[in-house]
Amino acid sequence: MPDAGDHPSRLTRPTSADLVIVGAGLGALRTAEAARRAGFSGSILVIGRESHPPYNRPPLSKTALISELTSADLAFPLRSAVDDVEWMLSTAIDRADLAQARVTTSGDQSIHYDHLVIATGRTPRRLPSSVAPDRRHVVYTIEDAQRLRRSTSAGERVAIIGGGFIGCEVAASLRARGCAVTLVCSGDVPLERTLGRRLAEALVDRHRLEGVVIESRSRVLELVDRVDGVAMSLEDGRTLVVDAVVEALGSVPAADWLADGDVVVEAGVATDPWLRARKASGGVWSNVHVVGDVAQVPHPLSDQASIVLPHWSTPVDTARVVGAAVAASARGERVSALPAFSALPTFWTDQYDLHMLSYGMPATADNHELIAGSYGSECVVGYSRQGRLIGVVGVGMRSSVMALRDRIGQAI
Amino acid sequence: MIRIQVDMGKCQHYGQCVFEAPETFRLNDDDRLEYEREANEADREKLEAAADVCPMQAITLLD
Ligand SMILES: Cc1cc2nc3c(=O)[nH]c(=O)nc-3n(C[C@H](O)[C@H](O)[C@H](O)COP(=O)(O)OP(=O)(O)OC[C@H]3O[C@@H](n4cnc5c(N)ncnc54)[C@H](O)[C@@H]3O)c2cc1C
Ligand code: SF4
């Protein structure tokens, strides 16, 4: 499918659809596919703010910062099974009235649904600041990545605020382009909370070796535009001046448009184990599902505690459950008779020549140990909580990581 | 017959495809991806699942 503008379905203005999916990312695409695979034959309308059909985001903090990529380079293939799906791109949904089964665009067009899927992902958190946009970046869309790449060059000073995976990946990519990179994070070591101290330290050592300056235990209070660059005032009283900043401060659920609805929004839009949106007034909406990393869902590995899994595998895995649920419910069948969401979370990151693969929920561990290899080179680390293996992370050593994957959930 | 292509310039040998279609994809002793170039129509669903879960979107199916 071509970009918005020259696609015929863009010209139509549907006022209703049997299934309306809000957000046109990976989760939306996989939901449409899964619904068709499960036999759903009603009309499907996908509404998304961006002007592009769904494209792959992970390269945005990696290869797309090193060489120029377009949304077409990163577009997901559209299978013939979703040929009849209608795409309303460049369209934001402003509000929803779930009791009336209606969503409304920012252009004030109302669209009625039988089934609604919330697939709006997450919005990057920003610092309050008036610094000019060409000196202040986030990395969420293809345009963000293109702008960051074009407005930075070798030798320029770039500060990355936030020591999560995206911050670390951006640091590695900008180093590869010869920028002078400073990574500012509030914790002792970037990624410590997710990976545990030892593995996080090994990673940060690698960043230092590559020339990244790490400012840990630092909080940025303010960003100010100056003639000589952007001044960042740190909590400890120092001021760092750089040519550009990248805000990589985590994200919030893109759920503003649900503010008036009877839903529960915490770290994500809260659901039951079948990804049906929970009502603030109790119970669930049987015709409203949530997919992707906007969902906050109970999982067997978290002992059914409700969590957000902001990984690429989440839209793929939640869409399988939701596509089947929508198809079943359209046939009048009971959704709770279907398998609940239980897929093993999978995450990867590439920094320099390090390829890290994670299964399970290492961030919720109370203990971890080195299983193979050594910190600082290739290794496998096992993570446990209350004596149960709940995660495995490998740097390289693919087969060993994969072999341990099947033991996740079991006693150690 | 379905023909399978993997862009080895993109593939990072994550092995996600292996879980979906182990008859077609495997990691060898050096942890590198090996795969069959052809599969039967009966395997289409598994192969599409493998292509879908590939983080690098390196797998193409040709009819
Ligand atoms: C830079 C970057 C690097 C990443 N790297 C990795 C990685 O290495 N490994 C990994 O496992 N995961 C990674 N991820 C995470 C992964 O990409 C996400 O988990 C995944 O994209 C979530 O898919 P989604 O469909 O749920 O949401 P999204 O991909 O966020 O799509 C949601 C869409 O909804 C649209 N939208 C939002 N609000 C509205 C509205 N009101 N109306 C209409 N449309 C709306 C948005 O514009 C967006 O296009 C990365 C993410 C980013 C941003
Ligand atoms: S899932 Fe993709 S990247 Fe991973 S081994 Fe298979 S083809 Fe390669």
Image: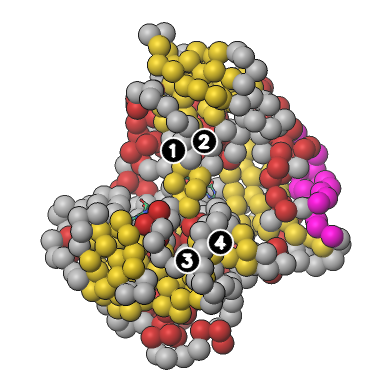
- Chain for mark 4? A
Same subunit: marks 1 and 4: yes
Q: Is residue A83 left or right of residue A159?
A: left
> Could you say which disc has been placed on residue A139 in the image?
1
Residue found at x 36% / y 41%? A142
Q: Residue A101's spot in the image, x, y percent?
A: 33, 74
Same subunit: marks 2 and 1: yes
For numbered disc 4, what is the local secondary structure?
A: strand
Q: Which amino acid type is marked by label 4?
A: Gln
> Could you say which disc has been placed on residue A296 in the image?
4
Instruction: Tell me: residue A329, above or below residue B1.
Output: below
* Front position among marks 3 and 1: 3
> Could you say which disc has been placed on residue A263 in the image?
3
Q: Which amino acid type is marked by label 1?
A: Val
Per the image, the residue denoted by label 2 is A248
Q: Residue A210's spot in the image, x, y percent?
A: 62, 23
Q: Residue A168's spot in the image, x, y percent?
A: 58, 34
